Amino acid sequence: MKIAVFVEKFYPHGSGGELATYLILKNLSDFKGLRISVFTGSENYAKIDGVSINYIPLLSGSLADSWPNIVMHQDWFLNTIKDFDVVYIPGYLYPLIDLAKSAKKKVIVHLHGYQPISITSVVYRYDPFKYSKNIITDMRRIVWYSVAQGNYKGIFRAPMASLLPLIRLWISKADVIIAVSKKQFEILSSDFPPLRNKIKVIYNLPPEICVEKNVSKHPYFIYLGGDSFIKGFPIFVKSLYMGCKRTTLTTAEFIFLNKYNQSNLNILNKVAKSCGYRIRILGRIEYEQMKKLHEKSWALIFPSHYEEPLPYAIVESMLGATIPVASKVGGVEEIIPKDFYSFLLDPLDANELLKKLEIISSLDSHTVMEFGCKLREYARKFLDPGKIKEELLKVFL
């Protein structure tokens, strides 16, 4: 069985979807019945033994670049596809679906977001426009998010919502569509019923997180979301202001990762100075460095209000024996054991987030270690790589 993987970015570039693709191919590469070739727009990529990875400049850039390139060079792509049995699309290169079906190939689309619902691939828990197939509504959604994020250039992406019907048409032609959580399946199939019978729910393979847990003496919190509106940065900052001078939090240390513009850096520095918090802003760091932070961390702060399909941040937190203080969105509740639901919160509720932080801070380090070990044991059983690999093989073979 020869599998062609077409993806615009390949690990270590990208985010959770690219990491998931890398882990899938790495796990499937040792199966003797499969020969895997990757075609990617990433010039520098992580290598996988037994997998052929090919840099294709035509696939680099945004949709505005890669989609026209596929159309203009469809003969090349079609000739390439003809050499394979299966075409696997874990990203956004949907024009290839038509080419693959014209060549009578099996097509597998892996959705790590909600592309059939919104061109942004994002669905909010409290979406002011609700789930909608209407192009105008999705344009308004893009404008709303861009303004909320302070990215006014993003407003000019609104016309791209006109591509939504085309995306839905292409994806509906796939033979199998993989969703990464039951919640994602429910949202996709509810909004776009034609997908229901084609969707197979398969959880993402867990990454390797091997840390020697030795929590710090004082509360130690990690936040990974940068200044993203989606990831709940404004809610987190608001909760810190509300907890100003609270004795339970003044001994805590808060680690901020990812990107922050100068305005939000100033806000964090102001919060630290006026409230006496110990705040460290590390920005973007290597993935291995991020995993190492879990060695002494007490909790991960995850106040997202996006219906996260299956957030790797939560999976990594549990495997790192770190308590997730997370919003009840998307697949989060599916992977966290019910004994730890008390640490979950409603999205956009800064007061509730503050209460959770205070509860964590009131614990002793021994209890934090005990909770973390329980979470890690649960995650290892729930996300069993062997079982997930079996489910993937059934789809590809």
Image (cartoon, rainbow, N blue to C red):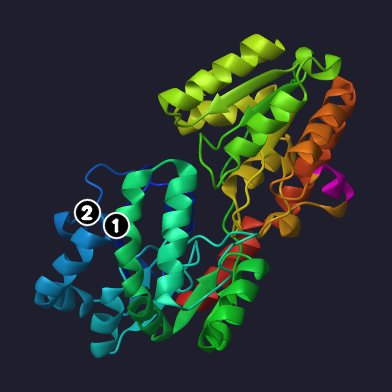
User: What main secondary structure does the magenta stretch of the protein show?
Assistant: helix
Q: Quadrant of residue 366?
A: top right
Q: Is residue 198 left or right of residue 223?
A: left
- The magenta span reads 339-343
Residue 392 screen position, x and y as percent:
53, 69
Horizontal arrangement in the rendering, residue 65 relative to residue 286 (left or right): left
| Disc 1 element | loop
Considering the image in quadrants, where does the N terminus appear? bottom left
Q: Which residue is identified by label 2?
A: 60
Disc ID at residue 8: 1
Say which quarter of the image contains residue 373.
Answer: top right
Q: Is residue 295 visible?
A: yes
Residue sitting nearer the eye, 187 or 39: 187
Tell me whether the residue at label 2 lies in contact with that at label 1, contact meaning CB atoms closer than 8 angstroms.
yes
Q: State the image quarter where residue 140 is shown.
A: bottom left
Say whether residue 326 is left or right of residue 181.
right
Name the amino acid type tagged 1: Glu
